[in-house]
Image: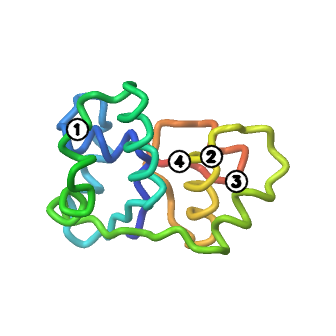
Amino acid sequence: MRCLLDTHTLLWWLFDDPRLSQTVRGILTDPSNAAFVSSASAWEIATKYRLGKLDSAAPLVQDMAGWIARAGFVELPVAIAHTQRAGSWPQQHRDPFDRMLAAQSVIEELPVLSRDRALAQFGVLPVW
């Protein structure tokens, strides 16, 4: 299975947060699965850290690529096709990070590991 991690899923995995579902834990521990992390998640984490909303992310902000690689995840860069899809959806959802993850999910045909049901308005059914 190939999948895309929502930002909170990435954080909860890296910090072993008990809020991470058993389903997601099972997917991420299965070596036959490929888990992708959007570069938009790195942007979101850095932004929230800068704004003082995510103080625990200091080590991640210093070496996001290293943390992703050590976790065995694969970076998914933001492409022009992703930005066009994210920016063109008529939905009123204002979170640019959610819009980008949804666009990447649809275009790359990757289910999103997320507890955020708001992604459904973009035709994305999160796995949790």
Real-space Cα separation, disc 4 to disc 2, in angstroms: 17 Å
- Labels 1 & 4 near each other (Cβ < 8 A): no
Q: Mark on residue 91? A: none
Is disc 1 placed on a helix, strand or loop?
A: helix
Is disc 2 placed on a helix, strand or loop?
A: helix
- Labels 3 & 1 near each other (Cβ < 8 A): no
Real-space Cα separation, disc 3 to disc 2, in angstroms: 16 Å
Q: Quadrant of residue 100?
A: bottom right
The foreground one among 47 and 30 is 47
Image quadrant for the N terminus?
bottom left
Is disc 4 placed on a helix, strand or loop?
A: loop
**Number of residues whose C-alpha sits closer than 10 Å to that of mark 3, classed few (under 14), some (14–19) or many (20 or more):** few
Q: Mark on residue 58? A: 1
Disc on the earlier residue, 4 or 2: 2
Real-space Cα separation, disc 1 to disc 2, in angstroms: 22 Å
- Labels 1 & 2 near each other (Cβ < 8 A): no
Image quadrant for the C terminus?
top left
* Residue in view at x 18 percent, y 62 percent: 66
Name the amino acid type tagged 3: Gly
Q: Position of residue 31 (x, y in %)?
A: 19, 68
Circle 2 residue: 96
Name the amino acid type tagged 4: Pro
Q: Nearer the viewer, mark 1 or mark 2?
A: 1
Disc on the earlier residue, 1 or 4: 1
Disc on the earlier residue, 3 or 1: 1
Name the amino acid type tagged 2: Pro
Circle 3 residue: 123
Is disc 3 placed on a helix, strand or loop?
A: loop
Q: Mark on residue 126? A: 4
